[in-house]
Image (cartoon, rainbow, N blue to C red):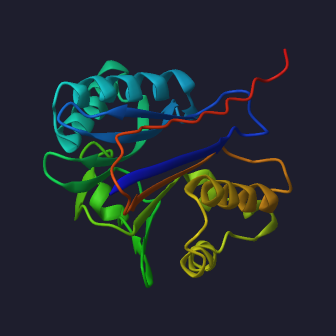
Amino acid sequence: MEIQAAIAKVDSYTSPQEGDKVEIIERPNGGISIIMAEGKLDNQRSKAISIKAVHALMGLISDGIHDGAASRAVLTNLKNEHHGRASVALSVISCDLESQTIIITKNNCVPVVIIRPEQVDFLNLESETLAGGCITPAVFQFQLESDLTFFLLSDGICSAGGQSHQSLDIREIMETFLEDQSMDVQAMADFVLNQAISLDTGEPKDDMTVVVFRVRPVLFNGIRRVSIQFPIKPA
């Protein structure tokens, strides 16, 4: 088996302050984690808070701290450090080879989409689950097995089209992927992002991030690949 992962991301057109931050790290006992965070300070998006949260969480996971405990520590520390003025929406997906599981850790209500060979499921977190300032994230575990695909979405994806009273039909898109199993993970991430951008008439009203995380059967050859495209804004 192998993990295939892709990220597609665009900043808000209307704000110079980026809020979403995504990073990939290797786990100390084998596997990888993808961390997505949207930080806010005084209810305004904050790149500094996002970066601080992601880097702190990367450090704890690298030290072998479990995802849920690491996330709670980061969220608590940020809240205390900024006297309740800072908050972070965290979504973490990990392939943990020690436990042979996929672990999802979240403290926000944006659903995770799971595509299995013949069905599409939504992993929803009710708002009641997130009481207490979102300090205690929910943790879900799935056995590591082939032909599982997970989508982590930021709230900018789910709110796309809101100003024109439209919304992204996520289930319809996912069922398209279910019918076409040949599409690679980057194409899937790009497709969801482009659909969301189009609903905002080409000018995203919020930061938009799509993470696709797929387990596929493959003959082991030991080769790891990472591909990055990082556009630079003109000065």
Tell whether 84 sits left or right of 43.
left
Residue 13 in which image quadrant: top right
Foreground of the two, 167 or 129? 167
Residue 79, horizontal then vertical, whole percent: 33, 29
- Name the residue at 78% across, 62% down: 199
Q: Is residue 210 above or below residue 82?
A: below
What is the count of numbered marks? 0
Q: Is residue 175 above or below residue 201?
A: below
Q: Quadrant of the C terminus?
A: top right
- Name the residue at 26% across, 34% down: 27
Tell whether 92 sits left or right of 164.
left
- Name the residue at 67% across, 33% down: 229
Tell whether 21 sits left or right of 196.
left
Foreground of the two, 82 or 177? 177
Residue 21, horizontal then vertical, whole percent: 52, 33
Residue 130 in which image quadrant: bottom left
Q: Is residue 26 above or below residue 118?
A: above
Residue 33, horizontal then vertical, whole percent: 34, 40
Residue at the extreme top of the image, as rendered: 235
Q: Is residue 202 above or below residue 118?
A: above
- Name the residue at 69% across, 60% down: 191
Tell whether 136 sits left or right of 189.
left
Residue 195, horizontal then vertical, whole percent: 74, 62
Q: Quadrant of the N terminus?
A: bottom left
